[in-house]
Image (cartoon, helix red, strand yellow):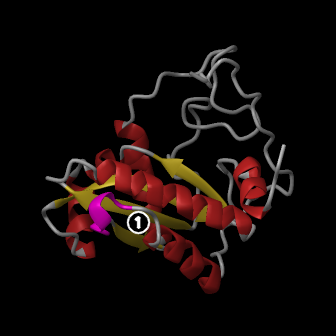
């Protein structure tokens, strides 16, 4: 298989769910955010808003709200997210859906725009690939609107001055991985490429 640095990063990136408490370097954060800003967007609208929270208390409380409002199906012996780095579906003792990440970037999209979720998702992928290339761990947390679905969450949105015509689409967790051992990839499922 042909390869280069970008393809190697794509194959190397894994979701990280265990973080050291120290913040990532500011230069790395700026590079990761720039990767998000340069993601494709429908019609070139560049409508995604990136809100960076490095406040431990806010992140912990929003992560607990997210877990409480998540409707995850508990893992079983044969159906699970990760054995190496369990998710909230794998381990009910995990209290926060943000896994102690010191930096949480919430991506917001316009409520009345058909491709808001798509634009946020492609920006998140750019950010996670940039993070991996810089040795920073990341994790994609979908359906971010339920992180703000209580009075505290609503107060946070007001404090952050998020526009009322935008909604929280997803979160990207960032931090230094707690473990030196990088998670291994699950085998790729066969039969997913159809050449016609």
Q: Quadrant of residue 154?
A: bottom left
Residue 157, image x and y in percent?
Answer: 24, 66
Q: Quadrant of residue 120?
A: bottom left
Residue 164, image x and y in percent?
Answer: 13, 64
Task: Give the number of marks.
Answer: 1
* Residue at far bottom of view: 27
The range drawn in magenta is: 41-47
| Residue 80 higher or lower than 50, as above or below | above
Q: Quadrant of residue 185?
A: top right
Using residue 190 as the reference point, say whether residue 172 is left or right of it.
left
Residue shown at the point (60%, 37%) measured from the top left: 87
Element type at mark 1: helix
Residue 162, image x and y in percent?
Answer: 22, 70
| Residue 5 higher or lower than 32, as above or below | above
| Residue 178 higher or lower than 145, as above or below | below
Residue 116, image x and y in percent?
Answer: 28, 53
Q: What residue does disc 1 label?
A: 58
Within the magenta stretch, is there residue 181? no
Using residue 49 as the reference point, say whether residue 126 is left or right of it.
right
Label 1 Cα crowd, 10 Å radius (few <14 / some 14-19 / many 20+): some
């Amino acid at each position: 298989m042909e390869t280069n640095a970008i393809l190697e990063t794509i194959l190397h990136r894994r979701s990280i769910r265990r973080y050291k408490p120290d913040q990532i370097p500011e230069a790395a954060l700026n590079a990761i955010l720039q990767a998000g800003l340069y993601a494709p967007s429908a019609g070139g609208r560049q409508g995604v808003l990136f809100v960076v929270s490095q406040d431990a208390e806010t992140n912990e409380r929003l992560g607990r709200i997210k877990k409480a409002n998540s409707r995850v199906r508990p893992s079983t012996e044969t159906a699970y997210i990760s054995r190496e780095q369990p998710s909230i579906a794998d381990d009910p003792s995990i209290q926060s859906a943000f896994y102690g990440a010191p930096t949480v970037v919430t991506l917001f999209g316009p409520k009345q725009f058909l491709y808001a979720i798509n634009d946020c998702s492609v920006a998140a992928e750019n950010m996670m690939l940039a993070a991996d290339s810089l040795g920073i761990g990341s994790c994609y947390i979908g359906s971010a609107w339920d992180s703000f679905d209580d009075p505290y969450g609503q107060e946070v949105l007001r404090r952050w001055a998020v526009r009322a015509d935008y909604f929280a689409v997803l979160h990207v967790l960032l931090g230094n991985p707690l473990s030196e051992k990088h998670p291994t990839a699950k085998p790729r499922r066969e039969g997913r490429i159809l050449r016609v």
